[in-house]
Image (cartoon, rainbow, N blue to C red):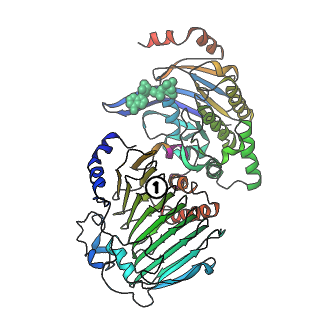
Amino acid sequence: MTVTDAAAEQTADAVASALEVDHVESHLHPVSSFDLADHPMPTGREEIWRFTPLKRLAGALDDAPDDTDALTVETIGDASYVVGTLAPGQHPRGAALVPDDRASALASRHAPEAVHVRVPADTELDEPIGHRLTGAAGKRSHRHTVIEAGTHSRATYVLDHRGSGVHAGNVEVVVGDGADLTVVTLQDWDDDAVHVGTHEAVVGRDARYRHIAVTFGGSVVRTSSNVHYAGPGGDAELLGLYFADAGQHFEHRLFVDHNAPRTKSNVVYKGALQGERARTVWIGNVLIRKVAEGIETYEENRNLVLTDGCQADSVPNLEIETGEIEGAGHASATARFDDEQLFYLRSRGVSDEESRRLVLHGFFQDLIRKIGLPELEEKLTAAVEDELARNVAGKVL
Amino acid sequence: MSTLQITDLQVSVDTEDGPKEILKGVTLTIDSGETHAIMGPNGSGKSTLAYSIAGHPKYTITGGSVTLDGEDVLAMSVDERARAGLFLAMQYPVEVPGVSVANFLRTAKTAIDGEAPKLRTWVKDVNGALEKLNLDSSFSARSVNEGFSGGEKKRHEIAQLELLDPKVAILDETDSGLDIDALKVVSEGVNRFREREGKGVLLITHYTRILRYIQPDRVHVFVDGKVAESGGPELADKLEAEGYESYLGASV
Ligand SMILES: Nc1ncnc2c1ncn2[C@@H]1O[C@H](COP(=O)(O)OP(=O)(O)OP(=O)(O)O)[C@@H](O)[C@H]1O
Ligand SMILES: [Mg+2]
């Protein structure tokens, strides 16, 4: 589906108001503020919270500090790029991320020392760097990470979440002009974990930012991955894979704010659902501001529903305030296994179960192979295989 | 020695107006070493016959039997049929995004043989099979049938035939949509398969063209869900000259 004139007309009001004031009155713009008072406890009726099972958040939105020993942190790769900590307001903390929901405000408030990762200008890292976070059962943790990619640097940062507990995490990303940064966030939590997170990136002039979210585990995982631009020519690619099992709620919220001309965004999320009350939510918000002439955006969400009793919500939102764009489109589809694909594989002797696994493998692989970083592709493929082996083997689908 | 025996097969499909009978009693015996051509007009039920033997869930068997070496094929699941030695080259091969040809072929071969093929020889076999069908080795890394041209899909089906080595192959209009060079390449592949010991082929086609390259032992004219006439290769010449008209008239 591509944007039609009808969609453009609907935004005519928004265009008019944007001419008068700088601030765009849009539900794509919740209040941004560090002050917790600006983010009252949600009731569930708010647009940004209406899909989230608030009762199951296990106090993730309560205003309370970290429990002791709530999080074990290990460094992945070369630790020398973890350069120190940042207090609230200490540059570049706050350069990209101003909390726009309560979870993010809490993560900021209760993380007095943000972890500062910095890749110097013109530095190219061949190996990924990152952190592995392991949550302790029944404990609450907050974290704020600032990743700064210097101009013309190239790096991959991996944030690996596992274990249990209740975690609120902010990741603030500043991609310098001409830099090429990939951020991978893995959510492979235990079945009882709760995770609310905001990843906010500002993409510099002619920079390239890739954000890859992989969610396989947790009770409730809700991530908001946002992008805006510091200048023209920035290119953002937001990719996601998820596999929700019985009772799991995985919510991926995306927001691309095209606030600069000739910027690009490409959002592709693919998910599978299996089991009673497996629930996924995908919200793809794209705002094309008046100044954002010549931009190009595409967003896509595909869900594969493997059993009865699952629910996949998929809500693309496109608000356009200028007609002078290269292209804007979105696609969203939720489907069951394709009988013809299964028949084809089975007619070659492959069992029903293995055919399903193969189709699923392909469903995810189709996205993974577009990443273009062979080592990362291999690791993600292995992670998917592992997830499929654990969850699709031996089950009657 | 193997025998595919189709006896009085009756098949219907579900439509909005209830079940519709398509195969109205098909009887055929294909012994190993034999190639039978089935020729018939559009909509006569040729693909229905092929799919029913392979076990496509869309078709309901309402009567008759199919056996392979005495085993009840209709009681087997789709994959059991393939493992028992049946292969269907499809009229419209299906795209499977994200699954590489190499992965697909290895998985299928492992399933059919009950053990993984030897890595060293397997890669050579795959590349050899692809090459013989004019598919360069880059096809290994591509998604199954995705973005393949019509002709490439058909050649990929025959590459599978050679690699999976079934007892009986059913080829559903493998010739349609092929230019003359591709038709030769595909025919050579089928003929290589036929040269192997004890193979049976059921060649479904709309045109006599392919029968110049693949000599059938028997030709069956298929009209309105059944075999209207059977004969030797000379029957194909008659069809070439006269078309299906005389049969269609008779069936009204
Ligand atoms: N779902 C369906 N609903 C109604 N009719 C159907 C359905 N599926 C198949 N048919 C009909 O069954 C008949 C046989 O179809 P089939 O595909 O077997 O023919 P065919 O001989 O292979 O034709 P072609 O030469 O075009 O490949 C056709 O008339 C077709 O329209
Ligand atoms: Mg047909």
> Which secondary structure lies at badge 1?
strand
Q: Chain of mark 1?
A: A
Region rendered in magenta: A341-355
Residue B76 appears anywhere in the view: no
Task: In this rendered view, identify the residue nearer to me: A160 or B230.
Answer: A160
Left or right of B215? Residue B147 is: left
- Which image quarter holds the C terminus of chain A? bottom left
Task: In this rendered view, identify the residue nearer to me: A173 or A393.
Answer: A173
The residue under label 1 is which amino acid type? Val
Work out whether A361 lies above or below A10. Answer: below
Task: In this rendered view, identify the residue nearer to me: A351 or B107.
Answer: B107
Task: In this rendered view, identify the residue nearer to me: B15 or A267.
Answer: A267
Q: Quadrant of residue A254?
A: bottom left
Q: Which residue is mark 1?
A: A267
Asked if residue A346 is among those painted magenta in the image, a careful observer would answer yes
Q: Residue at x 66, y 21 (%)?
A: B211
Looking at the picture, how far across and down is residue A245, in whole percent?
41, 65
Left or right of A335? Residue B106 is: right
Q: Residue at x 45, y 46 (%)?
A: A338
Left or right of B118? Residue B218 is: left
Q: Quadrant of residue A6?
A: top left
Looking at the picture, how far across and down is residue B61, in whole percent?
43, 35
Residue A89 appears anywhere in the view: yes
Determine the main secondary structure of the stretch shown in magenta.
helix
Q: Residue at x 52, y 36 (%)?
A: B53
